[in-house]
Image (spheres, grey):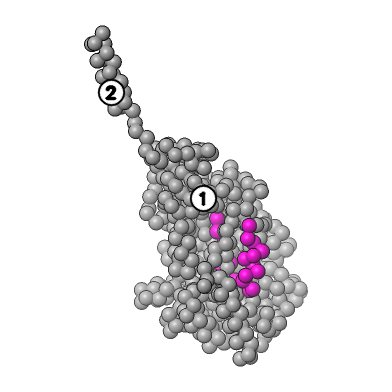
Amino acid sequence: MKIVGRVMLMTSAFLILMTPVKTAAQQVQYDVVLASGRVMDPESNLDAVRYVGIRDGKIAAISTQPLKGRTVIDVKGLVIAPGFIDLHSHGQDDENYRYKARDGVTTALEMEVGVSPVASWYAEREGKALINFGATVSHIQAKMTVMKDTGTFLPRDNAINRVSTPAEVSQVTALINQGLDEGALGIGFGINYVPTTTRAEVFDLFALSAKRGVANYVHMRNAGAVEPASGVGSLQEVLADAAATGASLHVVHITSMCLRQTITCLAMIEGARSHGLDVTTEAYPYTATQTRLESAIYDEGWQEKFGITYKDLQWVTTGERLTAETFARYRKEGGSVIGHAIPEEISRLAVADPRVMVASDGLIEKGKGHPRGTGTFARVLGLYVREQKAVSLMDAIRKMSLMPAQRLEKVVPSMRMKGRVKVGTDADLTIFDPATVIDRATFEQPALYSEGIRHVLVGGVFVVRDEKIVEGVKPGKAIRRTTR
């Protein structure tokens, strides 16, 4: 009996020793567990199969071993990436947020045109947004208000045609200061849309931004290669202002401004950075622009500037290509037009360049618009990563998540909690199939959801599950500066 007892005792001890000890992370039950996914974190360069545990809207565990959760989703074969951050998203309503979510975007920011007034814009979206939102204070809209321009989103008369008086410049500056006091993320410029804005006015606002510690998000004064009003010359203007004031500068949609001179403009930006300037840029992965036909962009000389003609313009409402006659009629009427002006090799160059972030410049209105409003991020992953191999998957994710977050971190410290997949960061996550992800939207049918973006979480809440919008949830939060 004693021998048997000893054998039994030894056996029990052996079993205890051989039983794997569960880690603290494995013993906890999480709100959501993403099981067996390929975690890709662009900050640490982690690229490995892991289990991700989410609790209270944060990533609470990243484990090599299974985790327990109230909801467990098998994501084997899928990539778990940081939610994409779109720095240039004009569509700031539920229609557009749904397209963004289906394209993997968890944070959409209106940084170019911006908004004015700022406080009411944020208040209108609080508690009502599918994804995170935020904006700069708008130089364009401040000028439109002060100069009593009759345009809505963009100017169409007074802010285009006449120079501001000194009193009006002071009023515009006061509105911009007010917007910054209300938590705007920076100053948004569209100099091309308000062409009578003097260089001195832009310089003074750069100096203001440096004093207030915010960046300038700039649609430059001119596009194309025709001198003296070229993209290169326009970039020189804002680089000089940044150098002279110490202001931070973000140049929007570099490819549509510099066109075939994009290589030169990127070299200029890199040179400025190497000499200590805080300068960044972005591009969308398409070969066409979109803006209002009645805006200053299409004033006399647009054909030479962009190297295109009427047949290269596509009226958004009908999809038709324009003629001289329809151009004149629609310009008087007002509305959105697509300009097929960006060479494909320039689009590919920008997507591949490690200095260039991805941003959509997107806007869909009642199902009409440019496909960049619905398919930008899936297009990069499907066309330029998988099919053309122009950029690596990790670098593409970095350009769509970490880099935009880093652009904003100095102004909004909470952005350090986005753009990463690491313990303690916000559970803003995009889970996609690298073998199938692709944009479906076209210039003729822009209102088509992307494919292959399986799940999207904002603050740990599913907004897309199994490639379907989750109805009835509004977890989006304001991205906003804290002011004192």
- What secondary structure is marked by label 1? loop
Could you tell me residue 388's position as x and y percent?
A: 47, 54
Name which residue lies at 66% across and 48% down: 472
Q: Which residue is mark 2?
A: 14
Question: Mark 2 is on which residue type?
Answer: Phe
Q: Residue at x 71, y 70 (%)?
A: 335
Q: Which residues are magenta?
A: 105-127
Q: Which residue extends farthest front?
A: 2
| Distance between mark 1 and mark 2 Cα atoms | 41 Å
Above or below 264: residue 78 = above
Q: Could you tell me which residue is drawn at 43 percent across and 80 percent down?
A: 246
Between disc 1 and disc 2, whose residue precedes?
Answer: 2
Q: Note whether 260 is above or below 414 in the view shown.
A: below
Residues 221 and 341: in front is 221
Residue shown at 45% from the left, 44% from the top: 52
Residue 321 seen from this side:
no
Q: To which quarter of the image does residue 244 belong?
A: bottom left
Q: Tag count in the figure?
A: 2
> Would residue 298 be found to the left or right of residue 4 on screen?
right
| In the image, residue 261 lies in the stretch drawn in magenta | no
Q: Give the residue pinned by disc 1.
A: 57
Task: Determine whether the residue tagged by mark 2 lies in a helix, strand or loop.
Answer: helix
